[in-house]
Amino acid sequence: MTSLPQVAPRIAKLTALSIGVALLATACGGASTPTSTGTGSASANAAGIACPAPSAGAGAGTSAATNAGEVPASTGTTDTALKIGSLLPTTGSLAFLGPPEIAGVNLGIKEINDAGGVLGKPVEVIHRDSGDTKTDIATQSTTALLGQGVGAIIGAASSGVSKTVINQITGAGVIQFSPANTSPDFTDWDDKGLYWRTAPSDVLQGKVLGNYMATCGAQTVGMIVLNDAYGTGLAKNVKAAFEAAGGKVVAEELFNEGDSQFSSQVDKVIAAKPDAIALITFDQAKSIVPLMTGKGIKPTQLFLVDGNMSDYSKDFQAGTLKGAQGTIPGTFAKDDFKKKLLAIDPALKDYSYAGESYDAVNLIALASEAANSTKGVDIATQLKAVSESGEKCSDFPSCVTLLREGKDIDYDGQSGPVTFSEAGDPTEAYVGIYEFQDDNTYKASKEEFGKL
C-alpha cells in the first residue's frame, strides 16, 4: 500500500455531535431548514402507541428549479476522462437497495454527459456488485474497478462491507463515496481524506428513531439487532436517545449475518413485554416480522430502519405491516425526481438512497471540474468546497455553469442540504419517517431535520 499525502485536512474530526431536530409539518420542497412543527396524533393501539399524524402532502412536491439554459464549454481540459465505479448491492441481504442506488448513479451520469461531460469529456461509469459481508464479492469487485483506473467508487451501501474495502480503495488514492453508509466509525477513519458520504451518521437516525418512539408514547422498547457495524452502532444511538427521553430498553437481542433462525431472539424480546419493538436488520425482517405478528405483536408496535425499509407486498399477507413505521436518512424523493428515476429503471419500487447516490455522482463530477483533474486525490480537495458557502444550485448543469463562470457554488441536492465536515460527513440532514400501508408498501409520513 503506497503512502499518500493528506488530501483534505481532517483537523476538525467530529468528536462531539450536537443534534437539533425539528418535526416538519410538510415535506421539504428543497429548503435547507425546517419551517414548522407537526401536530396531531393517530389512534392509540393496545400497546399504548399513539404516534403523531402524518404530515399533509408528505413526500409530494417537486425539486428546486434548475438552470435550463445552455451549459458553457469547460475552461479546463483532461487527457484522462473521469471514470467512476459503483460498488452497490445486486446480491445479498441488501440487494433491494441496489436498484434505486444504481438508478440514482445512472441518472446523474446521464445528466452530466447530456451537459457535455466533465472537463470536455464524457464520464464513464462501471458497475460492480458489492454483495454482503457473507462473501468476498466486494473485494473482488474493488480489485476489478481499481484495475480499470477509476478515480472514485460510489459504495458500498453496507457499512460492514465498506469496512472490508475502505483501506484498499483509499490506499490506492481513489475516492470512496458511499450513498448509504451510516456507521459513526467512518468519521474518524484514517482514510487519507478520501472517504466521503452523503448519508448522515447513525448518530442522527438513532436520535430521530429513539425520540420518535418516545413521542409515540412508548415507555419501554425491545430491539432485535444485526451484530455488525451498522446494527450495533445504530442500536447504541437509538437506545441513548430513547433513554434520554425517559424510556427504558427492556430487551436487546443480537443475531449475526447469515443466521436464518430468529425464534430465540423474538421470544426473549416478546417476554420482556415492550411497548414498541425496533427491528435493526437487513432483509432478515422477512423472517422476523411474521414471527412477531404470529405471537400477537401488533404491526403498530414495530419500528423499522433503513436497512429493512422495503416493499413487502409480495412477502407478507395484506395488512401484516399496516401501521408499522420506519426511518430512512434523507429527505423524501420528490415526484419529478421519481419520474426521472423511473425513466432510467421502470421496474423501481423503492427510492431509498437514490437521491444520495445521485448527489454523490454530481459532487464528484463538480469537484473534478473545480480541481481541473480526474484523479481521486485532486477531486477530494474540492469536495467540501463545492458543498458550501457559494451560490445555491441543485444539479450538474446549473452548478457547472456557475463554476465555469468563475463563481463559488453550494450544491444542495436530491438528498437535501449537503454540507461536508472536515471528516467527509454531512453536517446536516433530514431523516424521513414512513408508515406501512395495507399492501405492505410504505408511504411518506413526516421528516425531521437535524444538524451534526
Image: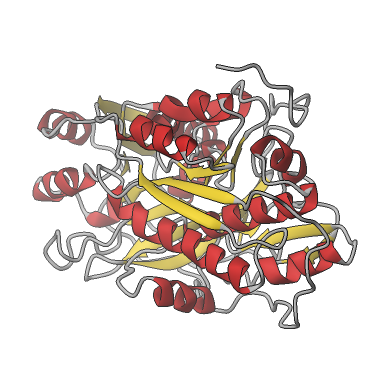
Residue depicted at x 53% and y 69%: 110
Q: Quadrant of the C terminus?
A: top right
Q: Quadrant of residue 156?
A: top left
Quick one: 397 or 324, which is closer to the camera?
397
Q: Is residue 228 left or right of residue 447?
A: left
Furthest toward the front, the residue is 79
Give the vertical position of 59 relative to 285 (above or below): below
Q: Is 370 rendered above or below residue 114?
A: above
Residue at the image position 73 percent from the left and 39 percent from the top: 378
Q: In the current view of this chain or complex, which residue is farthest to the right?
A: 406
Q: Percent position (x, y) of residue 114?
A: 60, 74
Where is residue 338? Give x, y as percent: 46, 74
Left or right of residue 297: residue 251 = right
Most foreground residue, 33 or 350: 350
Quadrant of the rendered image containing residue 190: top right
Applied colour scheme: secondary structure
What count of labels does the image hold? 0
Q: Name the residue nearer the viewer: 262 or 245.
A: 262
Residue at the location (75% across, 44% down)?
Answer: 384
Q: Quadrant of the N terminus?
A: top right
Q: Left or right: where does residue 95 sit relative to residue 368?
A: left
Q: Is residue 64 left or right of residue 404?
A: left
